[in-house]
Image (spheres, grey):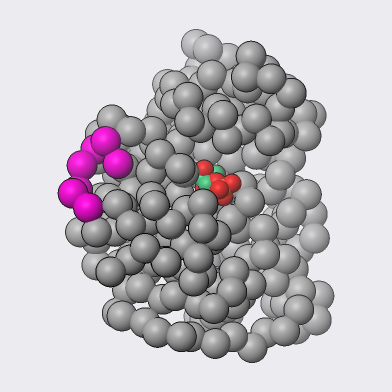
Amino acid sequence: MSSNFKKPFSTPNLNIFETSEDASIYVAHLIAALIRERQKQGQHAVLGLATGTTPKIVYQELIRMHNIEGLSFSNVISFNLDEYYPIPSNDERSFSYFMHNHLFQHVDIAPHNIHIPNFNCSNADIINHCVDYDQKIIKAGGIDIQLLGIGRNGHIGFNEPGSDFDSVTRLVDLDMATKEDALRDFISLEEVPSHAISIGIHNISRAKKIILLALGERKSKIIKTALQGEVTTMLPASVLQDLSQVEFVLDKEAGMLLG
Ligand code: F6R
């Protein structure tokens, strides 16, 4: 994969690229630059990571940089956005499996620096687990770069429409649109978990830099409303309009309806 990319046009916090590969490689390079800068300073880089189709090429490019350019993840601390609840620990559809498969097992990140909401915790432990997750983020110094995808319904993480802008890590009910989208991995709607543990919009908003990556025509409508419509809890990603540390990174298809 080439590491050259072309920037057709940009505004301070909106970059639209010709292809999904160009957009993804640009994001991977932002992440790699942070990791390297922190390495020079002898510090950790704290990454907030997403799963799904959107970040796959970003992770591929990071792995390529690890293999070919010696990019080390030894100073990386990661916090994933979310995980289905409940889901068996060895289930290939869990986000934990996804992250190991698409990134962690290919790089030199220390296992103790990987954080993913725990699909194994008991019902009684969920609240403590969520409080603990938030505290671990704070203890790590906060998230330096939060990578986000966007759901068809405007969710970020699994903060579904109606989520409070000051929400923190918690157990959430999954929206029907989210469950329907998850059908690509599950055999039937009944099999899709109805809950997840997700970090909250407050956690996301506190990240020092937020990158929302959206790829493909199927994201164009929600991107138009999220970026140019009303800021409302009914469209969680709209909260990003008011945050100066956000960068929207789109391919041409995802940005096609923006005026
Ligand atoms: C994934 C997550 C979700 C996805 C969103 C887009 O960890 O938190 O918000 O980013 O559902 O999913 P894809 O990329 O599959 O279209």
Q: Main secondary structure of the magenta part?
A: loop
Residue drawn at point x = 81 percent, y = 75 percent: 67
Whole-percent x, y for residue 183 in the image? 65, 30
Is 235 above or below relative to 66? above
Is residue 74 visible from the viewing direction of this image? no
The vertical placement of 22 against 148, above or below, is below
Q: Quadrant of residue 256?
A: bottom left
Instruction: Judge whether residue 245 can be spotted in this image.
Output: yes
Task: State the image coordinates of residue 121 (x, y, percent, origin top left).
Answer: 59, 21
Which residue is drawn at the image coordinates 51% and 69% (left, top)? 251
Seen as rendered, the residue at the extreme top is 124
Q: Residue at x 38, y 50 (%)?
A: 222
Report which quarter residue 135 is drawn in: top left
Residue appearing at x 51%, y 58% in the figure: 217
Give the vertical position of 95 relative to 110 (above or below). above
Query: Picture coordinates of residue 54 (x, y %)?
Result: 59, 55
